[in-house]
Structure formats: structure tokens, C-alpha cells
Amino acid sequence: MSDREEYAPGPASGAEVRKGGEKSTLIMVRELREPPEQVWRALTDPAQLREWAPFEADGTLAKVGATVHLAWAAAGTRAPERVTVTRADAPHVLEYGELRWNLEPLGSGTRLTLSIDIDRRFVAWGASGWHICFDVLHYLLNGNPIGRIVGGEALRFGFQRLNVEYAQQFGVAAIEAAAKFLAQH
């Protein structure tokens, strides 16, 4: 059996929501064993992003001013999103679109923090997806990639359970339609 077949996400953790108007800010934190420089490459290199992120980038995200198209895995027929890198302080801060990444040295590893503005109705759904993506990133960084798990495939790997757990933590309703949407994408 491969690590992918055995993969199951742990309990919902490491996330918080800061409420705003129509959108809220979802903050996901993960502690990784690898140094910030290695994590930075996984956040900016298109080949590595294809291995773990919920989108593909058609160029590097490592330079301020770079304009990149992000094709989100569960976007259905939506056209790729064009984003410009507004901050790239290697290996500490990366910002583009509605995503902000902070990398802090933590011993010999990294505390990775993602902040993303998201429609408040979808915060539990977003946290569930990013939770799985961060797990896959962990495998990639450890030299044992299991392949990206996004869209409908995430349903086979605990997405629905995470959606319910994060909804309870955030005090929001779990989106039952998430399973139907993901199954179609």
C-alpha cells in the first residue's frame, strides 16, 4: 500500500477566522520540519505547486511584479485567475491575489501561515481544502510526495469530516452542497 492510499487527515486544527463584511479572513497555520528556504520554493515554483496546491501557476511566484495565471482545481469552467505578486520577501513573506503567506523560522523548521480572504459562507470548506493541501505539502517536503488531492478526489480523503469539524469550530453551517460540487469537479 502506498502512503497516498493510507493517507487520512488528522482532526481539524490550526485554523481561525477573522470576520469581516461579506468576506472573512481564514488563517491556517502549520509547523513544518523543513527550513523556510525549502518551504519558499514549494510556494513559488510552478512544478512544486502542481504537486500540492489547489491551483496550478503558469509562472514563478518568487518575484514582485510577476503576473501569473492561477488555474484553480475546483473552479469548474471558470477561467484562470490572473494575479500579480505584490510582495515577495524571500523566504519570509509572499502575497498575490487574496493569498498571504508568512514563513517564520521555528528551530530548524518553519511556521507557515496562510491568510486568505474568503466568502464567510465558505470558511469551513476552505479550511478543509487547505488542511488537505498542507498535509500533501508535508509529504512533498519530506521527499515522499503522494500527489495533489483536490476537487472531487478530496471527498475520498476526509474532506467532508473536516468540513463538519471546521464548521463546528468556526460556529458556521457546514456546506452540504460542497460534496456535490466537488464530485462534479
Image (cartoon, rainbow, N blue to C red):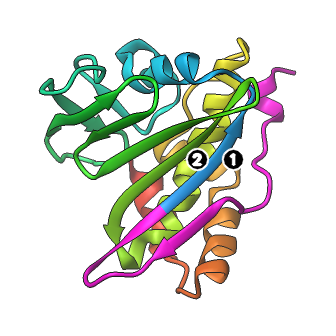
Quarter of the image where the N terminus is located: top right
Q: Quadrant of residue 96?
A: top left
Is residue 142 positioned above or below 134 on the image?
above
Residue lying at the far right in this picture: please name it: 1
Q: Is 100 placed left or right of 153 in the picture?
A: left
Residues tagged 1 and 2 counted as in contact (Cβ below 8 A): yes
Q: Position of residue 83 (x, y in %)?
A: 16, 38
Give the residue drawn at x 46%, y 64%. Answer: 26
- Residue 77 - label: none
Q: Position of residue 56 (x, y in %)?
A: 33, 28
The residues colored magenta run: 1-26
Q: Position of residue 119 (x, y in %)?
A: 32, 72
Compute the Cα span from label 1 to label 2. 5 Å
Give the residue drawn at x 45%, y 32%. Answer: 92
Q: Is any atom of residue 74 visible in this view?
A: no
Disc 1 on helix, strand or loop? helix
Amino acid type, callout 2: Ala
Residue 174 colored in magenta in the image = no
Task: Quickly name the residue at label 2.
Answer: 154
Q: Position of residue 28 (x, y in %)?
A: 56, 55
Q: Quadrant of residue 134?
A: top right
Q: Is any atom of residue 64 visible in this view?
A: yes
Residue 12 colored in magenta in the image = yes
Amino acid type, callout 1: Phe
The residue carrying pointer 1 sits among few (fewer than 14), some (14 to 19) or many (20 or more) residues within 10 Å by Cα, namely: some
Task: Quickly name the residue at label 1.
Answer: 157
Disc 2 on helix, strand or loop? helix
Q: Is 88 placed left or right of 168 in the picture?
A: left
Give the residue drawn at x 41%, y 71%. Answer: 122
